[in-house]
Image: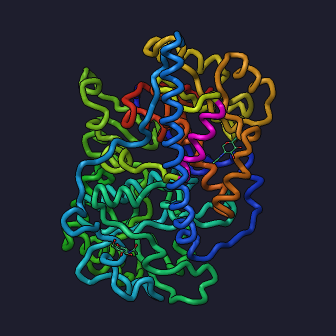
Amino acid sequence: MAPYTSLASSSHDVELGHPEAKARGDLRISPPQGLRRASSLKRRQQERTRRFAVGGGVAAALVLLLWTFTGGRREERREVFGPPPSLVRVGARAGTAPNATTLLTSAAPARSYHDALRPDLRYLTLDTWSGWSGQFLTVLSQLYLAHLTQRVAIIPSFRDADHYGDAMITADLLMDFGKYRREHGALFVFWDEVKPLDRAHATTERDAIGCYMGVNSFEGGRSFDEHNLDQTIWRVPRPGGHLQNSVEALTLFDYDDEDRLKRLRKFADKEGREIPPNMLDSQLLCYSSLWDLAHAGALTTGWAWYEGFRGQQREAGELKDMLALSARGTHPEWWAVGQYVDFAPGIWDIALNATHHTLGLDYVPKNLITIHLRRGDFKSWCSAGENCTPTVDRYIEKLEPLLDLSPPGTKILVTTDEQDDGDFLGAIDALGWYRVDHRALGTKAILDARYGEAAPWADAVVDQAILSLGAHFVGTSGSQVSLLTELRVAAWNGGETRLVERPS
Ligand SMILES: *[C@@H]1O[C@H](CO)[C@@H](O)[C@H](O)[C@H]1NC(C)=O
Ligand SMILES: *[C@@H]1O[C@H](CO)[C@@H](O)[C@H](O)[C@H]1NC(C)=O
């Protein structure tokens, strides 16, 4: 992966404005709790389907062998997808990794969260904002900080009516958090295991929850109120001066109870506010947002999320290039947590099937370059207000050095949210690139059948699984999908990645 990237650059443009998402905005479906449980059944079914798919892969391997034998050119196949398996088995000794049954009281899920939390454990929570990618990235930060501070993460439910209708999900519908728990022993539960969804505030108690300010200004979460949580945000200054948003400052702030409570009381006095009970001890710590963490090492060298979200470190000298990506101090949550969180089997099913059909193959080639052409609201998101997305030529420029690293005949697989601009789509097709055409593939019907009202969420993740198959990757700057794909292609495939800048 080349220089660090690029998240979107103002609070209202992070992954907003997908043209289809706008249309979806008026869906009015409200699944109560249990969507997650219902889907776990589906997931088991899908796991079986995937095993069949592997069987199909073996048959395909035989065909290829024959073809190679009869003079065809060999194309290396890819047999393993997602993160490398972990050899650590935390649950091996006890036979199981701690989950909600052990991490919460027997009263959970309870009418008040106070009854669900074990008095002898420490917990860390937050609410999330933005689309799927932003919320997922925030949870990675939460899991990372929880790990460093020896707390159980209470992962928020996801809600985003701007993109996905009113369906709420828990993140394990789309990502394999069960495998992550088993392999890494991470301690986490989901909010609906602590306290049920209660969107009408009818069946649970209204619980106050006080949250310290996070590391950026995106403070409005989307789901706490749906669990009947009354959130207040407390902008109590942390120690650490200009490094108060570093991972290190957050860690010390947590452990130095005395200092934290002193600062809190002083702040409460000044503001004349009453402190919610969860802030008066150390049992449940809450932040408003932890999206995009950085270590002090990155912050001291000039990295700052708000500088257009470029994520570049501005060191002079050669140090930056000498440091491994994982050691530069930016996106530490990805290197510690995110890289180990796989897509759920049901997402892989659909993504691999779409890839096979698009390439006209019954396998995924090992050498493949993926490209993410993000358009959507980017089209009008620049100072000129129009023609704001890069032309296809800009992607070709970034692709060329990656082709030099690849064997002849490497296929180019493209995903784009553009469905209507015939000239643009024609220009891609004329290059001989393989474009995933979800309309032609009928992906929507498949997603609807499997995920019901949560289908728009699943739709947001399928392309990410497809893009992760790239041995190398070209993305669009400012897109969190491109950022996540850069990280996946670097961590899972050791690939090189490039981002195309958008006109300013
Ligand atoms: C936690 O794990 C145990 C042992 O595998 C299992 O019996 C139990 O159902 C799990 N609890 C939850 C809430 O998933
Ligand atoms: C695989 O894709 C094809 C073409 O889009 C579709 O007809 C078929 O239903 C898909 N199968 C599965 C299991 O998703």
State whether residue 355 appears in this view: yes
Q: Which residues are magenta?
A: 346-358
Query: Taken as a whole, is the magenta stretch helix, strand or loop?
Result: helix
Residue at 61%, 50% in the rendered image: 12
Residue 152 location (% of width, % of height): 31, 69
- From the viewer's perspective, is residue 6 above or below residue 29? above
Q: Position of residue 344 (x, y in %)?
A: 49, 53
Please state the horizontal and vertical placement of residue 438, each as a whole percent of the image: 71, 40
11 left or right of 165 in image: left
Of 134 and 45, the residue lying toward us = 45
72 to 129, vertically: above or below? above
* Residue at the image position 38 percent from the left and 43 percent from the top: 83
Residue nearer the viewer, 447 or 227? 447
Does the stretch in magenta take in 228?
Answer: no
Assign the C terminus to one quadrant of the image.
top right
Identify the residue shown where x is 72% and y is 21%: 429
Q: How is the image coloured?
A: rainbow
Figure check: 237 above or below 350: below
Q: Which quadrant of the figure contains the N terminus?
A: top left
